[in-house]
Image (cartoon, rainbow, N blue to C red):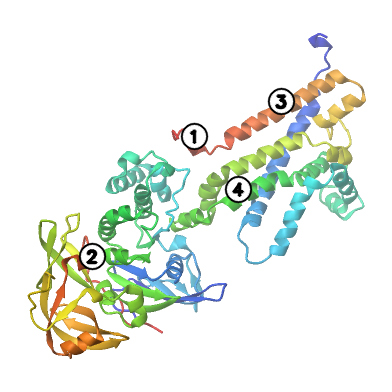
């Protein structure tokens, strides 16, 4: 079932006392896997089971071939033996220790000199040098998060688990910290499993994604795959019908960015930060389809596309397009008939500049990212 | 009245009181901390048993000391189950001995230790414990490095309150220990004895010592109950 190069292979079921069961299926060889779904869908339970804090009833968890949990063989390693870095939603800094004390907490067995060296490297890396003697309660949310990250990473774990890492922060700060967090996560070179219910966070931080609802895994794949091609209507409802494309900012002028997406140049409102690699998000309902170039249309972004499929969805029609990249458009039935949309037909797709959303993506995954795309049942 | 006129403080009684209070506090730390941890833990089963244990631990608060003393006296009589067990183990008896008043003091002071301990443990954020486990620290190391510092104020309060209360324990000590100098005669009993003998000067001196102990205790609690690390944060 597992592919070569997978380091974490987990497939298990956790049964809660209330009777609800939660399935966990996570396989990753590296990069950031996002557990994504609405609140209360069981993402945190899956993360806690990976950490060894919640015990599954059936299934297996193995890392680098070492069984961490195996219901049949009666194996259940405690969190202490799993060598993980775990960041809970609330960060759980020790309030009676200062920043340096928190960061060095797990290093007490090291010789003093080595411990001091490792702590100072970690403090420098997370820009905490000047805060070393401060108490956690006196720090801002962003600073506390950096301390928690430093504390988890300083002991060099082999797997990093994060539960809603940005949820405790206010929205503007979240947006500002996302690229930095992504950069840190990629720099560690560790496989990361990250829980979030935030659409933008999944896009900005994830390489792979596991979509969950009511304790079930609905779809797994790369972020772009899953967001662009939801497996079914349930996934589409959770992730939204949106095309997520990998793009590269090639020019910024007058607040507008020119983004190259598989050879097609799109114009979008530029990001405040200087980011070269971006996710380009196009909502299906924002994509306009035309038969011929229409001089009266104001949309700046126009490009030819071939119709791949046409699927009726109630009063609307979902149109799959190939424009050098995959794109989905939602149009009314009447418009579909008027345009005579059939697979293989050539059309012109148009998107207004403000409808092209860019999400920064600092750093590439450490190696070609792969998650299993089959959903075990 | 000159200084020489004052009868000397009953040093034997003072020493005995100090020994009793210290030993009781140590025993209650050994028994009370694990018991309170169990009482405060989020249990799935055994809530009935837990309720019973909690009630028994709180009982001394509402029971008149003379009543408790009477039952203890009956329960520890040489012919009783406990008395025979104790006799078999040590060859001695419990009533009117130091061991007897020690047992009484431990039982009577259960609520003063268990109460603050349990409150502190129950208020502890379990996610801090889990964070420590995930950082590779064993359960025992987590106890020492997370639970103790986090619950420090409650633990200190429990220990100091126990000590202070044993110093003032009277009814149950008199009931089970009587008034044997050097064996069961504590300062509180000596005070009562002085007043009975109309020796008000000696009584005043003993009372003053007891007041001083109580004051020092309260100040100690206030100082120690501040978490060590919270001093000097400049807040």
- x 71%, y 25%: residue: B212
Q: Which residue is mark 2?
A: A366
The residue tagged with tag 4: helix, strand or loop? helix
Q: Are marks 4 and 3 in contact (CB under 8 Å)?
A: no
Which of the 4 image quadrants contains residue A33? Answer: bottom left
Position of the C terminus of chain A, as image quadrant, is bottom left
Q: Which residue is mark 3?
A: B212
C-alpha distance separating marks 2 and 4? 46 Å
Mark 4 and mark 3 lie on one chain; the one further toward the N terminus is: 4
Q: Chain of mark 4?
A: B
Q: Chain of mark 1?
A: B
Mark 3 and mark 1 lie on one chain; the one further toward the N terminus is: 3
Tell me, yes or no, whether dots 4 and 3 are on the same chain. Answer: yes
Between marks 2 and 3 in the image, the one whose residue lies nearer the viewer: 3
Crowdedness of circle 3 by 10 Å Cα count: few (<14), some, many (20+)?
Answer: few
The residue tagged with tag 1: helix, strand or loop? loop
């Amino acid at each position: 079932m597992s592919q070569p190069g997978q380091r974490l292979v987990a497939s298990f079921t956790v049964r809660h006392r209330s009777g609800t069961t939660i399935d966990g299926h996570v396989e990753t060889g590296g990069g950031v896997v996002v557990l994504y779904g609405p609140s209360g869908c069981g993402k945190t339970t899956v993360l806690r089971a990976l950490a060894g804090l919640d015990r599954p009833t059936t299934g297996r968890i193995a890392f680098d071939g070492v069984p961490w949990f195996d219901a049949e063989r009666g194996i259940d390693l405690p969190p202490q033996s799993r060598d993980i870095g775990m960041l809970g939603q609330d960060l759980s800094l020790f309030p009676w220790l200062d920043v340096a004390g928190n960061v060095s907490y797990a290093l007490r067995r090291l010789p003093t000199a080595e411990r001091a060296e490792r702590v100072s490297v970690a403090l420098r890396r997370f820009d905490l040098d000047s805060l070393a003697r401060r108490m956690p309660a006196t720090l801002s949310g962003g600073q506390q998060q950096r301390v928690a990250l430093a504390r988890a990473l300083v002991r060099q774990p082999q797997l990093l688990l994060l539960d809603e890492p940005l949820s405790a922060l206010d929205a503007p700060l979240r947006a500002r910290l996302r690229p930095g967090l992504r950069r840190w996560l990629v720099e560690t070179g560790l496989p990361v499993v990250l829980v979030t219910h935030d659409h933008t966070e999944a896009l900005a931080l994830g390489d792979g994604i596991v979509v969950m609802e009511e304790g079930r895994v609905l779809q797994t794949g790369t972020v772009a795959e899953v967001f662009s091609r939801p497996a079914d209507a349930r996934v589409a409802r959770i992730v939204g019908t949106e095309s997520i494309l990998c793009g590269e900012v090639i020019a910024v002028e007058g607040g507008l960015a020119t983004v190259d997406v598989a050879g097609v140049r799109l114009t979008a409102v530029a990001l405040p930060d200087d980011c070269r690699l971006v996710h380009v998000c196009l909502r299906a309902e924002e994509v306009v389809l035309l038969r011929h170039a229409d001089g009266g249309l104001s949309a700046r972004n126009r490009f030819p596309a071939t119709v791949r499929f046409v699927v009726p969805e109630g009063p609307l029609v979902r149109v799959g397009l190939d424009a050098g990249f995959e794109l989905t458009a939602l149009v009314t039935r009447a418009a579909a008939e008027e345009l005579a949309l059939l697979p293989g037909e050539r059309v012109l797709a148009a998107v207004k500049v403000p409808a092209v959303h860019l999400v920064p993506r600092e750093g590439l995954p450490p190696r070609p990212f792969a998650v299993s795309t089959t959903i075990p049942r | 009245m000159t200084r020489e006129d004052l009868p000397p403080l009953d040093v034997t009684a003072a020493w005995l009181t100090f020994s009793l209070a210290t030993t009781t506090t140590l025993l209650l730390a050994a028994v009370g901390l694990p018991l309170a941890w169990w009482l405060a833990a989020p249990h799935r089963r055994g809530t009935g048993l837990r309720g019973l244990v909690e009630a028994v631990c709180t009982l001394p608060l509402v029971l008149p000391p003379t009543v408790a003393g009477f039952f203890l006296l009956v329960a520890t009589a040489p012919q009783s189950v406990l008395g025979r067990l104790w006799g078999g183990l040590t060859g001695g008896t419990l009533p009117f001995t130091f061991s007897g008043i020690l047992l009484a003091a431990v039982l009577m002071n259960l609520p003063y230790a268990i109460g603050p301990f349990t409150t502190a443990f129950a208020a502890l954020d379990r996610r801090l414990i889990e964070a420590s486990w995930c950082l590779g620290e064993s359960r025992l190391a987590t106890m020492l490095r997370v639970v103790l510092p986090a619950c420090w104020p409650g633990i200190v309060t429990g220990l100091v309150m126990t000590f202070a209360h044993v110093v003032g324990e009277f009814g149950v000590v008199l009931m089970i220990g009587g008034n044997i100098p050097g064996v069961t005669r504590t300062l509180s009993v000596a005070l009562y004895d002085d007043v009975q003998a109309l020796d008000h000067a000696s009584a005043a001196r003993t009372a003053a010592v007891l007041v001083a102990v109580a004051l020092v205790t309260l100040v100690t609690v206030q100082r120690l109950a501040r978490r060590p690390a919270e001093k000097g944060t400049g807040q």
